[in-house]
Each structure stands twice: as structure tokens, then as C-alpha cells.
Amino acid sequence: MPQILEIAATDSKLIKAFIDFPFQLYADHPQWVPPFRSEMRKILTRNHPFFEHSEAAFFLALRQGRPVGRITVFENRRFNSIRKRKEARFYHFECTQDDAAATALFEAAVSWARNCDLEVLEGPHGLGGMDGSGIQIEGFEQRATMTMMHYHQPYYRRLFEQGGFMKVRDLYTAVIDRENFQLPEKIRRVAEIHYKRGHFRVPLFRSKRDLIRIARQIGEVYNRSFTVHEDFCPLQEVEIDRLAKDLALISKPSLIKILYYDEKVVGFLFSFPDLSRALQRGRGRLNPLSLIGLLREAGRTDTLIVNGAAILPEYQKLGGNGLLYYELIRTILDSDYRRAEMVQIADTTTLMLADMQTLGGRIYKTHRIYRRATVR
């Protein structure tokens, strides 16, 4: 049987093994995109903002002294308090084709959750707002979408389902090829009408500093707009500031669309260059050389990532979403991008799915969120 070790925040040897394991597992997989090692180290040493309000445990599976699997299990106490739930979540699952190791990791996570008086174990869910969710179950010929929608081994689905996990929901990634990209006449007419009325506007941003300046207003829109989503937990100010800095690192101001009604921020649509190739070349390192690589890739990639759209509830039926898409489409058609990826489209979000199809998109990757009861 494999040995399961829980990793302490001060155990540098096991922390390194936990971080290194997927680099070994995916060494020959061109679709895999690595995380930043430094960010992983912050999580494992509990220097991440998540640990200001919640806790987590990290388990490593060893066979004959060599890592064969890993998993993170955690309780987001803010989420459970707000949603009135007793839920544990898991993340960072990776495993060789070792059924016994996978089973032992699942049981360690379930046992930890049960000892915390939590009734279900669900995931994969990240610790932060930019982390991707779900285990990939379709589209393995496609590269991961940066560090948001991860590439996984095709046998993971079998491991989870034989481990007693059940489907909660699917998350789709859709691709829109430039030759199929459509600007529906209806959206064009709605945009023209709103511009004539003069209340809605989507200004063109040229400075990242200007975007950071309104980050708190964008965060308020996010917090008020996403309350209907089952996985939602409101962002705190420190999390909003962190996300703003992350977006500033990878975004181009012209690709971030902010919807105003008069002088009030009421919606947004985030898109940014696909930096996956640069992340692969960087091998998880975050240093001056890798940052130069990211900046260069931002200027030459032919793929745009669309992830994150929201409008305040009281403005949602006034046509503002059409205006955001109108401005995004105009930006894309005036650029050299050959395709766009729309990510994290839940199978329950009929409006987003309809928008994707209206724009000429097709689903080409699927990730699944799983759940298992922890009570006997």
C-alpha cells in the first residue's frame, strides 16, 4: 500500500516534492501548462491570503519513497458561513495510474473533512478567484488554458468515479475561430441605440493604472452579480487588490471592457492574451527572464482568452451585455487575433451558453466538478 504523508508548513523537503510532482507526471505532455512554483510555495507554507480566514491540509502519496500522487483538501470558512454549508473542497489532485494511491488520497481528504465536521467533499475548486475548477473529461487534444482550466490525465475521470464521486456540474471551454466570428445585427443595433441614448458607455482604456484605480468598483460589481452562482463567495478587499495586480500582469488595457451607466461602473468583460506557450517555456519560474517571455508572448499570441463577465442585477435587462460584446468584437476584428476562448461556462448558465453560440462559438473542452459525501 502507498504511504500517505500530511505536509507541514515547515517541511521544505515534502513541499518541494509536492510542487515538483506534476512537472514529472506531465514531462512529455505538450498540452500541460505549469503553475508558478513560487505561488504554490506560498500556499504550502500558508503564506497565501486564504489562510487569513480558512485552513487546508496537503497530502502526498509515496510508493517506495517516490511520489505517486497528491491532493489538497480545505475548508473555505467564509464560503461555508455565507452559504450555510458544511462543505470541504479539494484541489491540486494529481496521480499516476495507481488506483490504490488515488483511493488512499481520497480517503485522507474525506477523513480530514469528517474530522472538521464537514459533510461533503467537492472539487476541484481553487483557493482563489483566478484558479480554475473541474477535472478535464473531454478535449484532451487541446492545450490547457493558461493556469485557469487545467490539463489532466484522461484516466482521472475513472479514478474519481470509482472512488465514489458524483457529478455536480460541467464547465465548458468554447472556441470561436476568426472565420466563424459573428457580429450579430441585433447586437449592433442594440449598441447603436444605447450610444444614442447616452447613458451606457464602454470607454477604451490605455493604461493599466487606470484599471487598477477602479478595481474596487469592479470588485463590487463582481460581488453583487455572482451571488446566484452556487460556488460564489464574495471577494474581500485584499483579494480584489490581489486579482487586480494579477490581471494587470497579463492583460492589455484595451481588452478589458468596463460598462458604465452615466458615471457608475455597472459591468465588465475580461479578456486577455493567451500566454500558455510562455508559461510552458518558463517551466513554472517567475523571474525577470520569464516575465520578459510573458510580455513577448502577449504581443504575438493569436489567441484571446475571455473569462469573466458580469453586470449589476438592476442593469442586466437593459442591453448592457450586448454593448460589452459589441466592443469586444470590434477590438478583436481590429486586431491580429485568430481565435478566442471563452472559459468556465457552467452547463447551468443558459444565457452565457446562448451568448457563446450567438457569437459563433463551439464547445471543445469540458471540465467536471465532483462531490462525495463524507458522512458514514
Image (tube, rainbow, N blue to C red):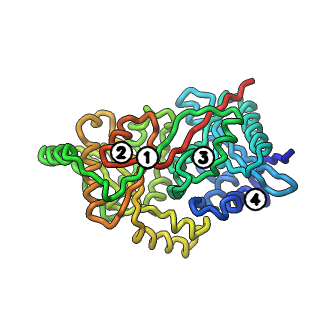
Q: Which residue is mark 3?
A: 50
The image shows residue 82 at horizontal and vertical percentages of 53, 31
Q: Residues within 10 Å of mark 3 (few under 14, many from 20)?
A: some
Is label 3 or label 1 in front? 1
Is label 2 or label 4 in front? 2
Q: Is residue 195 above or below residue 111?
A: below
Which one is in front, 77 or 138? 138
Discs 2, 1 touching: Cβ within 8 Å? yes
Residue visible at 73% across and 39% down in the picture: 106
Is label 3 or label 2 in front? 2
Give, as a three-letter code, the residue at label 3: Phe
The image shows residue 198 at horizontal and vertical percentages of 15, 46
Q: Which residue is mark 2?
A: 356
Disc 2, SS: helix
Quadrant for the N terminus in the image: top right
Q: Residues within 10 Å of mark 4 (few under 14, many from 20)?
A: some
Residues at marks 3 and 2, CA–CA distance in whole angstroms: 33 Å
Give, as a three-letter code, the residue at label 2: Met
As drawn, the label of residue 363 is 1
Q: Which residue is mark 4?
A: 17
